[in-house]
Amino acid sequence: FAFWGGEEDGLYGSQHYVDELSQAEIGQTAANLNVDMAASPNGVRSVHDGDGSDFGHAGPAGSKAIEDILFRYFQENALPAESTPFDGGSDYDAFLSAGIPGGGLFTGDVGRKTQAQAQSFGGTAGKVLDPCYHEACDTIANTNQELLQEMSGALAYATVAYAMGRQS
């Protein structure tokens, strides 16, 4: 497990880590499971579009398997989830650029919840997913604990799948 510093100022921590990997180490890296924004107060359950089928930008080979594992967790737990694009705004970018399969979870930042999302995930349509994103009020008190538990479950499920060699 790795936790990156410097993400908000330019993805420095993850980029430095990937830059220091040898080609052999890159080849031995099974996946980057990225979790950025996991408990937005008015959040949604979203999974990165590993195969590009929803947003047209796929991750490297193996990224679809990550997407499938995470969606499987939500399906098995009767929790709706939607796809979110790889838009270059998170630590996964360095890994994807190096050819390392990537995927992960996201609950939202400055976007506004749509009516359809409110019907699927609860919360309030028209309101920002995380009103404290990059603000002083972004503290543990500004989290959706139920959503955090659900997203943590999905991450644990994917981690165990990779640890046990059950990516498909």
Image: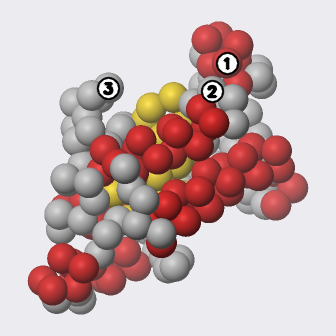
Give the residue at mark 3: 54
Q: Mark 3 or mark 2, which is nearer the start of the sequence?
A: 3
Give the residue at mark 2: 80
Numbered label tally: 3
Q: Quadrant of residue 93?
A: bottom left
Does 117 appear above or below 32? above
At which x and y percent is residue 22?
Answer: 16, 88
Residue 63 marker = none
Residue at x-position 50% and y-position 79%? 2
Q: Quadrant of residue 54?
A: top left
At which x and y percent is residue 59?
Answer: 24, 49
Is residue 80 at least partly visible in the picture?
A: yes
Give the residue at mark 1: 120
Which secondary structure, mark 2? loop
Does 39 appear above or below 71? below
Q: Pointers 1 and 2 in contact (CB under 8 A)?
A: yes
At which x and y percent is residue 33?
Answer: 45, 61
* Amino acid carrying mark 1 in the image: Ser
